[in-house]
Image (cartoon, helix red, strand yellow):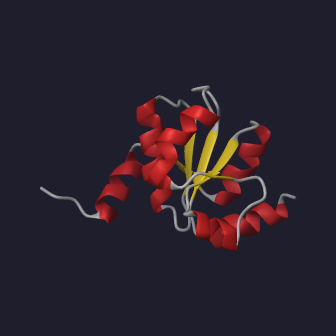
């Protein structure tokens, strides 16, 4: 049976550590984690979080192993609404990353929390 994108996202969220921006961003700083923005380059250029590394969802698997070869690196993933972040987090866990968190909220919330933490 075929699954819709919302169904895939729901399944990914069942198997992934999910946090809000208010939970994830302070933890990311405290653990010296990496904040990955999986939005497309154009979205990232419009507005982004200073600390975030932009690796679009479509090339995530190829780039992560090059840029972050340690499987124990704390990774926090965000996007525009949380859907791509959940799918990306699930995939990074399949690759073998051990400390992956998807930030599940709208980008405006992530951006606002990031401004408060500077």
Q: Residue at x 31, y 56 (%)?
A: 8
Question: 47 left or right of 78?
Answer: right
Percent coordinates x, y for residue 65 in the rendering: 55, 33
- Above or below: residue 69 compared with residue 56: above
Residue 96 image point, x, y percent: 47, 28
Residue 16 seen in render:
no
* Residue lying at the far right of the rendered structure: 118
Quadrant of residue 54 within the rendered picture: bottom right
Q: Using the image as rendered, state which of residue 76 and residue 39 is in the foreground.
A: 39
Q: Quadrant of the C terminus?
A: bottom right
Query: Which residue corresponds to the image point at 77% horizontal and 61% vertical from the top-left?
Result: 114
**Vertical placement of 70 versus 92: above or below?**
above
User: Could one spot residue 54 in this view of the protein?
Assistant: yes
Residue 18 image offset from top left, x and y in percent: 53, 50
Lateral position of residue 118 relative to residue 72, left or right:
right
Label count reads: 0
Q: Residue placed at 56% from the left, 62% from the top?
A: 39
| Position of residue 71 measured from the top left corner of the image (x, y, whole percent) | 57, 26
The residue located at (60%, 27%) in the rendering is 69
Closest to the observer, 89 or 26 = 89
Q: Quadrant of the N terminus?
A: bottom left
């Amino acid at each position: 049976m075929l699954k819709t994108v919302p169904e895939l996202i729901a399944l990914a969220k069942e198997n992934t550590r999910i946090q809000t921006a208010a939970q994830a961003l302070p933890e990311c700083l405290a653990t010296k984690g990496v904040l990955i923005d999986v939005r497309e380059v154009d979205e990232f250029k419009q507005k982004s979080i200073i600390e975030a590394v932009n690796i679009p969802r479509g090339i995530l698997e190829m780039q992560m192993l090059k840029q972050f070869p340690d499987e124990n690196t704390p990774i926090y993933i965000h996007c525009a609404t949380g859907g791509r972040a959940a799918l990306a987090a699930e995939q990074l866990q399949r690759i073998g990353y051990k400390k992956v968190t998807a930030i599940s909220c709208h980008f405006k919330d992530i951006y606002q929390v990031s401004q408060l933490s500077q």
